[in-house]
């Protein structure tokens, strides 16, 4: 939901509120989208994936969570002008014995990026948006999980 909203804000020059109304109309957002737009849904999924991927149980209150409700059209435009887009990412990163878990809006270069996973191997992503939604295909973590 969050990345769909951010893509619509960028592609159609919509405000957050306008994009949210459109997402509700098209069925991409729930009646009460607070869990999605505040980052809580991504944090719940991150906690599950952290347990599966690292074998570490993480409490939600230990995850830094920042949603997208404060992203403005100016933020979207500045990012686009610099060749980036804004996406809500859920990140679990191990550095030595420390595990960092966080959910927040992030600038991504719009061309291509890749990730590695022991279970899924190397994943490559192209573009910067919810293109898969338009084709009724799974996107993001759901896409990776369904292809494993």
Image (cartoon, rainbow, N blue to C red):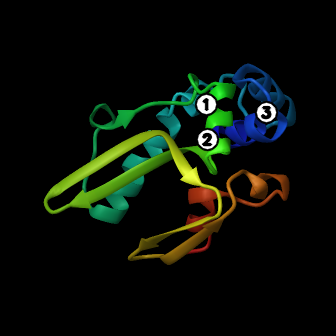
What's the mark number on residue 79?
Answer: 2
Give the mark nearest the N terminus, 1 or 3: 3
Give the quadrant of residue 59: top left
Q: Mark 1 points at which residue?
A: 75
Do tag 1 and tag 2 residues touch (Cβ < 8 Å)? yes
Q: Position of residue 1 (x, y in %)?
A: 67, 39
Count up the numbered dots: 3
Horizontally, residue 24 falls left or right of residue 97, namely right
Please, is residue 69 above or below residue 117 in the view? above
Q: What is the distance, in whole Å, between disc 3 and disc 2 at their CAs?
A: 22 Å
What's the mark number on residue 23?
Answer: 3
- Element under disc 3: helix
Q: Label 3: how many residues lie within 10 Å, few (<14), some (14-19) or many (20+)?
A: many
Please, is residue 23 above or below residue 127 in the view? above
Quadrant (top left, top right, bottom left, bottom right) of the C terminus: bottom right
Q: Residue at image x 25%, y 55%? A: 56
């Amino acid at each position: 939901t969050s990345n769909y909203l951010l893509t619509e804000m960028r592609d159609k020059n919509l405000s957050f509120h306008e994009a949210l109304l459109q997402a509700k109309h098209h069925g991409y957002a729930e009646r009460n989208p607070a869990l999605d737009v505040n980052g809580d849904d991504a944090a719940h999924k991150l906690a599950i994936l952290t347990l599966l991927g690292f074998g570490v149980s993480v409490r939600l209150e230990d995850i830094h969570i920042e949603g997208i409700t404060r992203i403005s059209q100016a933020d979207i435009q500045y990012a686009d002008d610099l060749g980036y887009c804004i996406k809500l990412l859920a990140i679990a990163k191990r550095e030595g014995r420390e595990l960092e878990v966080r959910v927040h809006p992030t600038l991504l270069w719009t061309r291509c990026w890749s990730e590695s996973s022991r279970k899924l191997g190397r994943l490559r992503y192209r573009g910067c948006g919810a293109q898969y939604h338009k084709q009724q295909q799974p996107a993001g973590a759901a896409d990776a999980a369904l292809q494993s």
